[in-house]
Image (tube, helix red, strand yellow):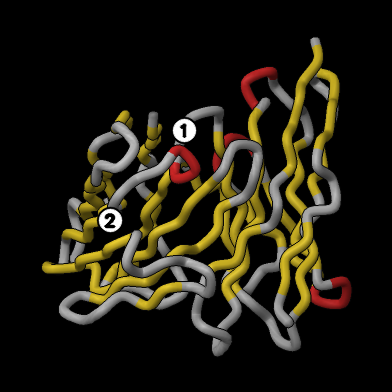
Amino acid sequence: GAVVSQHPSRVICKSGTSVKIECRSLDFQATTMFWYRQFPKQSLMLMATSNEGSKATYEQGVEKDKFLINHASLTLSTLTVTSAHPEDSSFYICSARDASGVFYEQYFGPGTRLTVT
Amino acid sequence: AQSVTQPDIHITVSEGASLELRCNYSYGATPYLFWYVQSPGQGLQLLLKYFSGDTLVQGIKGFEAEFKRSQSSFNLRKPSVHWSDAAEYFCAVFFPGYGNKLVFGAGTILRVKS
């Protein structure tokens, strides 16, 4: 149980275009999902927290207009990188909190490798 | 401020040797503690977690960790390392009441030599 999927696993896009990454909780309902970013050889940094049906909360220094987050249902959150640039190339990982579970536990997706050319 | 420290960026051990990866945190109460492993290009896999109770917790793949409140530590151990354990290990801590977020340490890269 508690499986989180991400799609796509890898994506290459041209500079200036937008790309959408999906995060799904497959066997549980997730009122809260989290988006992390991981640069090569670095740790995970929380970008934003999304709550179903409300606006996402972004961490300091994260551009909300560039990284659009939508959490339209209890099993799906999307991250859209708008007007992507090479410096946005990174590994993006989502996690989800089970609505019926404990508030301090999250389940992680397998990650999406974004390369902007 | 609440923080998580993994003091060792790289560790190299011989196959069959024991392993200990260090994790310390800064917090005034008992947090919730996790260890994850990440292979290159892959996502995170949960090794073990501590919420309460017995301070020695067993995880998958033969790993264990001990919570020491007096030292604010949650070190990961394995009695005999296998070549397949080579990966990056992250300690993560959830600090209740402080944004309710999971904070990751910088990670420790484990190399296993044969």
Q: How many marks?
A: 2
A39 relative to A26 in the view: left or right = right
- Residue at image point 73% right, 35% down: B109
Residue B69 point in image, percent of width and height: 80, 76
Residue A24 point in image, percent of width and height: 21, 53
Residue A9 point in image, percent of width and height: 31, 33
Residue A100 visible (yes or no): no
Q: Quadrant of residue A116?
A: top left
Residue named by callout 1:
B42
B70 relative to A87 in the view: left or right = right
- Residue at image point 35% right, 45% down: A84
Q: Quadrant of the C terminus of chain A?
A: top left
- Residue at image point 45% right, 38% down: A86
Q: Quadrant of residue A30?
A: bottom left
Q: Residues within 10 Å of mark 1 (few under 14, many from 20)?
A: some
The one nearer the camera, A13 or B32, is: A13
Is A63 placed above or below B10 here?
below
Residue named by callout 2:
A79
Residue A73 point in image, percent of width and height: 12, 67
The alpha-carbon separation of the residues under discs 1 and 2 comes to: 19 Å
The one nearer the camera, A92 or B90, is: A92
Tag 1 secondary structure = loop
- Residue flagged by tag 2: what amino acid is it? Leu
Tag 2 secondary structure = strand
**Labels 1 and 2 within one chain:** no
- Residue flagged by tag 1: what amino acid is it? Gln
